[in-house]
Amino acid sequence: MPSISTINKTLLSIPPSGIRRFFDLVAQSQDIISLGVGEPDFITPWHVREACIFSLERGQTHYTSNLGQLELRREIAIWLKRKYSLKYAEDEILVTNGVSEGFDLAIRTLLNPGDEVIVPAPAYVMYEPLVRLAGGVVCFAEGLEKNNLVLKCEDIEKKITKNTKVLILSYPGNPTGQTLNKIELQKIAKLVKKHDLFVISDEIYSELSYDSIHVSFASLPEMRERTITLNGFSKAFAMTGLRLGFICAPRNLLGEILKIHQYCALCASSIAQAGAIEALRNGAEEVQKMKEEYDARRKLVLSACKKIGLVCPYPDGAFYIFPSIKKTGLSGEEFALQLLKKFKVAVVPGNVFGKNYADHIRISYATGMEDLVEAFKRIEEFVRGGGK
Ligand code: PLP
């Protein structure tokens, strides 16, 4: 057999996802309260599951159009216009296997070898490996400690070189839960125009914005033509396992993106697409209910962190907080391992999201209120005991 060391060199240099690595450990333990996973604890609303079942019963199990079912793309176009004032035609929307596939397609479409890509940090784990696999060079733009890790336009500007091709935006963000406000986005838009950049805007948590209305980057003047917008059904609609997202881009660019999807995926699941149509048509009430529950939990975890003295960037959205655990004297990795071993609570160490975040942990509050209260009791005991 040929040696494994002869396979793709970039791939060999990429470690497996740090979140998954940690959760393999969690899977080996019993009675754990997990504040680790980045997925809704809610089951997909029944009417959406039912629509999937009906589509199976009707035998809708064939390939759909490569772009995704026309009926679904129509619903997405209506939803985007109503929610975020985005104007995309049916053939400017491509239904994908989650935002994960969407990001991979977008970055592979834009990059030539050596092109630089600015990635906001702390960053969700998929951006760096997929940029590198597409031949790009990652330049992290970090939100400063004094700005509570909120990314500012200046942090991005510092990273721009003559080789910069793409800026990635991801807001509300994972792992901080922070969002970008309209004023900052307008400044970023000016910068993007000045340096003639493409933008990939991952807005998967757009519906989970608690304090202000989400502003979609492509809705800003002159940004639509250079932006690839990613969104999907995993988070706000609680449909992670159905694997459904979508890409929006100007027609000529989407045509190029479609070529990769055509060859590597053909289309997204026909059953999931039936569920997504139902979710967009009749799911608003359920989404709102889940959002209100997340918001109540957000308030609870914020006040629990305050009580324990764990400082975190203010989370405007998503379902994460990213407190500093510096005062315990432990690294995030040690903190997470000890907390798991001694108090049976799972969190994710901050270094998973960037090497400069080793003294943070990510806590997901996509977990029931009762478990959250109990977990924070244990975290308090752990911290007050000096991490022992
Ligand atoms: N983008 C961000 C910022 C995420 O946090 C996640 C999942 O945690 C994804 C994308 C992946 O989304 P999907 O399930 O649609 O592939």
Image (cartoon, helix red, strand yellow):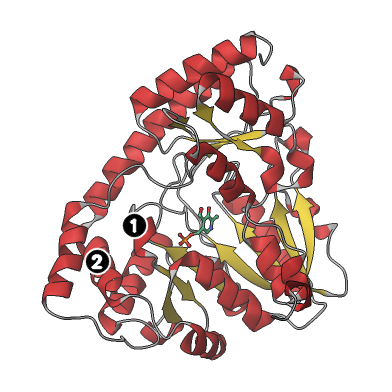
Q: Residue at x 85, y 57 (%)?
A: 158
Q: Is residue 332 left or right of residue 225?
A: right
Q: Which mark is residue 239?
A: 1
Where residue 387 sits: x, y (%)? Answer: 67, 16
Where residue 54 sits: x, y (%)? Answer: 13, 70
Answer few, some or many: residues within 10 Å of disc 1's Cα (few below 14, many 20 plus, some between 14 and 19): many
* Closest to the observer, 146 or 300: 300
Task: Indicate whether 378 appears above or below 83.
Answer: above
Label 1 beta carbon within 8 A of ligand 1: no
The part of the image, by quadrant, that contains residue 145 is top right
Answer few, some or many: residues within 10 Å of disc 2's Cα (few below 14, many 20 plus, some between 14 and 19): many
Q: Secondary structure at mark 1?
A: loop
Amino acid residing under circle 1: Met
* Closest to the observer, 196 or 66: 66
Dot 2 or dot 1: first in sequence order is: 1
Q: Residue at x 48, y 74 (%)?
A: 247
Residue bearing mark 2: 275
Task: Indicate whether 128 appears above or below 71.
Answer: above
Judged from this view, the residue extending furthest toward the front is: 1
Amino acid residing under circle 2: Gly
- Residue 279 seen from this side: yes
Where residue 10 sits: x, y (%)? Answer: 76, 71
Q: CA distance from mark 2 to mark 1?
A: 9 Å
Circles 2, 1 touching at the beta carbon (< 8 Å): yes
Q: Quadrant of the C terminus?
A: top right
* Closest to the observer, 25 or 186: 25
* Closest to the observer, 127 or 75: 127
